Amino acid sequence: MKKKMLGILAGTTLVFTLAACGGGDSAKDTAGSAVDPEKLYSQKCSSCHATDLKGGVGPDLTQVGSRLSKDEIEKVIVDGRNAMPKGQLTGADATAVAGWLAEKK
């Protein structure tokens, strides 16, 4: 009986953990709606590029869309460049932030 209850508890915990993590791509929140790219930027990018996008440790991004395409921005986000480490955002998160930044012209 104890083994059966332990198995049920472990299985339930695993299911809830996987549901909460969402497979590692947070482009959607638990309600299924799209996450705000500005929020992702604030969480992952603003420490180097500043909350106002004017730069700090990293370069100014206020007009990055006039220099780079969405695809080029996404490549930098995923692969890194110069001092910027790769993998700060991946998948749909990287795509969302790249699209938002590409509008900055």
Image (spheres, helix red, strand yellow):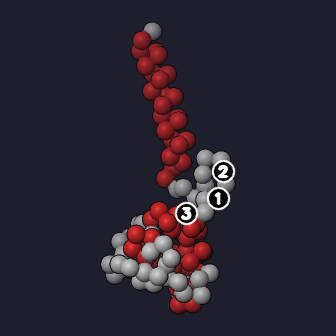
Q: Are marks 3 and 1 in contact (CB under 8 Å)?
A: no
Closer to the observer: label 3 or label 1?
Answer: 3
In the rendered view, tell whether residue 2 sits above or below residue 16. above
Marks 3/2: CA distance? Answer: 16 Å
In the rendered view, tell whether residue 24 sits above or below residue 4. below
What element does badge 2 sit on?
Answer: loop
In what quadrant of the picture does the N terminus appear? Answer: top left
The residue drawn where x is 49% and y is 38% is 17
Q: Where's residue 34, x and y in %?
A: 64, 58
Q: Where's residue 44, x and y in %?
A: 45, 65
In the rendered view, tell whether residue 43 sits above or below residue 84. above
Marks 3/1: CA distance? Answer: 11 Å
Q: Is residue 33 visible?
A: yes
Mark 1 is on which residue type? Ala
Q: Earlier in the sequence, mark 3 or mark 1?
A: 1
Q: Which residue is mark 1?
A: 34
Asked whether, in this view, residue 48 is left or right of residue 35, the answer is left
Location of residue 37 by image quarter: bottom right
Around disc 3, counting alpha carbons within 10 Å, would you say few (fewer than 14), some (14 to 19), or many (20 or more)? Answer: few
The residue drawn where x is 55% and y is 41% is 19
Q: Is residue 90 visible?
A: no
Q: Which residue is mark 2?
A: 32
Asked whether, in this view, residue 85 is left or right of residue 31, the answer is left
Closer to the observer: label 3 or label 2?
Answer: 3
Q: Where's residue 52, x and y in %?
A: 50, 76
Q: Nearer the viewer, residue 103 or 57?
A: 57
Mark 3 is on which residue type? Lys
Q: Which residue is mark 3?
A: 39
Furthest-front residue in this view: 52
Location of residue 96 by image quarter: bottom right
Asked whether, in this view, residue 96 is left or right of residue 75, the answer is right
